[in-house]
Amino acid sequence: MTVLSSKIILKDIRIFAHHGVLPQERTVGAYFILNLSVQTDFSRALVTDDLDGTISYADLFDLVKGEMATPSRLLEHVAGRICRAIFHCFPAATSVHIELLKENPPMGADCAGAGVSIDATRE
């Protein structure tokens, strides 16, 4: 078997956090939805059934939770911090795709969310 691509995925994580341009957003907080895909070669784990051959999605979640706990004005900044932290903490990560949406953003529109998306590769 030839593995063409392998990714660890966290989908529709709902986290309460304090991000926003307006001071009240950072005080009151809101819910955010995060989708994360981390490309890594886990072909060894396919054969060995050993966690050392992959990246733990539980560890990725802990990292995301920690970064989301630090208030920021911009979601771009939060998403960038998460990408940099993944590359720093997980040397086997080769690329990251992240979507970060704020539920019910204060912009006068009826929408499920508004946010950012980043596709990044290791330098």
Image: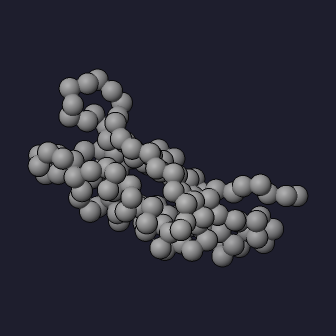
Relative to 57, 18 lies left or right: left
Give the answer, above or below, for where 72 lies relative to 117.
Answer: below
Where is residue 94 shown, x and y percent of the image?
Answer: 60, 64
Of residues 39 and 60, the one drawn nearer to the viewer in this rendering = 39
Tell whether 91 sits left or right of 64. Answer: right
**Name of the residue lying farthest toward the top:** 110
Q: Residue at x 33, y 56 (%)?
A: 78
Position of the N terminus, as image quadrant, is bottom right
Residue 29 shows up from this direction: no
Residue 97 drawn at (x, y percent): 52, 52
Q: Is residue 9 visible?
A: yes
Q: How is the image coloured?
A: one colour
The residue located at (55%, 60%) in the rendering is 121
User: For the view shown, which residue lies furthest in the right direction?
Assistant: 1
41 is higher (above) or lower (below) than 19: below
Q: Residue at x 25, y 36 (%)?
A: 105
Query: Where in the figure is residue 12, as x and y percent of width and height?
Result: 47, 44
Q: Nearer the viewer, residue 44 or 114?
A: 114
